Image (cartoon, rainbow, N blue to C red):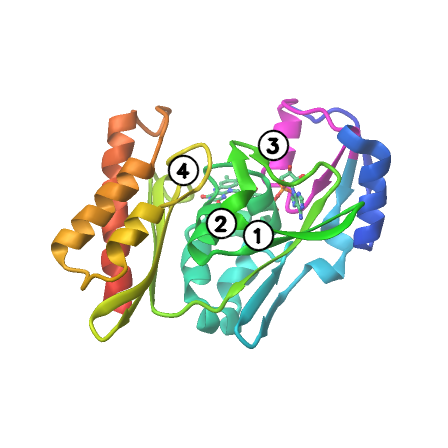
Amino acid sequence: MIASAFEYHKPDTVDGVISLLSKWGDDARVVAGGHSLIPVMKQRMTDISHLIDLGGISELKGVSIDGDTITIGAMTTQHELATDEALAEAAPLIREASLQIADPQVRYMGTIGGNVANGDPANDMPGLMQTLDATYHLTGPAGKREVKARDFYEAAYFTAREDEEILTAISFAKPSGGFAYEKQKRKIGDYATAAAGVMITIVGGTCTAASVALTNLSDTPVYCGAAVDALVGSSLDDTTIKVAVAAAVDASDPVADTRGPVDFKKYVAGVIVKKAITSALARA
Ligand SMILES: Cc1cc2nc3c(=O)[nH]c(=O)nc-3n(C[C@H](O)[C@H](O)[C@H](O)COP(=O)(O)OP(=O)(O)OC[C@H]3O[C@@H](n4cnc5c(N)ncnc54)[C@H](O)[C@@H]3O)c2cc1C
């Protein structure tokens, strides 16, 4: 199908975007890579009169590493995330997860900002950002504000972002220790049936810090606090890992769909979390 008619705008500053969003309100939408928005426009599942392209705003692009803080501009593509050598050295988990998104064609266009702002529970970056305890930087008519990724997602496609705000960047502390992003999908290029991001730090045989989060196992990404509590302070023995995996599966709340019934998804969640913990442990 063909999208209904809309006016196309391409401002070159964030202020320009905000003033267009303020002017047109609900009738306007920003477009980044277009790989989620354009398909729904073509299917006429959403009707937008003003499309605001973020592609002309250079300040929204690129990766910067400043001491212990990594900042990624919202318009940085998944291809750039997967190929940036400095980023791969500072936060290898980003490359590992980016390479599991869709296929090269999608990754050339899809941006980190569109992936996390969309609020699609099937997107991989929101779960990854829970794992990294990232901060989202938003700008709107009232100025700038920050929201933790773990507080951002309210329900499928509902987030803490106001209609007239845009996401400008994502930042997080340089991760340390072992890491893994494991994803089970039906075929190459597919969204996750279940995916998990895990980080583990070990000092003197004891786990001193951990992070566990899930993708596409609820209507929002899930940070698994109980699984983390089980891991931290332990020697990461088999019994502890079993308890952590069970806690993560308990935290999931999948729905039945074309990727399988609820029991199957919970089973896959257990397998994938165990695999992610084991891989992270091997690298810690
Ligand atoms: C065939 C296919 C397979 C895919 N498989 C996967 C997969 O396995 N894993 C995965 O994670 N993703 C997958 N995707 C999604 C893709 O990776 C993109 O990340 C995703 O489409 C959103 O990024 P985008 O830049 O294209 O955003 P767009 O489609 O341009 O925008 C998406 C939404 O976010 C809003 N938005 C965009 N940028 C901003 C911003 N800076 N501030 C505020 N709002 C903003 C838009 O208004 C829109 O509502 C797949 C897509 C396709 C087409």
Task: Give the amino acid at mark 4.
Answer: Asn
Residue that numbered label 3 is attached to:
39
**Residue 279 colored in magenta in the image:** no
Establish if 3 lies above or below 16. Answer: above
| Amino acid beneath label 1 | Ile
Circles 1 and 2, Cβ within 8 Å, touching? The answer is: yes
User: Which residue is the site of mark 4?
Assistant: 216
Quarter residue 31 falls in: top right
Residue at x 35% of width, y 31% of height: 253
In primary-sequence order, the first of circles 1 and 4 is: 1
Separation of disc 1 and disc 4 at Cα? 17 Å
How far apart in space, not on screen, are marks 1 and 2 (Cα)? Answer: 7 Å
Relative side of 247 to 185, left or right: left
Q: CA distance from mark 3 to mark 1?
A: 18 Å
Left or right position of 108 against 204: right
The answer to whether residue 102 shows anywhere in this view is no
* Front label number (3 vs 1): 1
Quadrant for the N terminus in the image: top right
Please state the horizontal and vertical placement of residue 113, each as a whole percent of the image.
61, 50
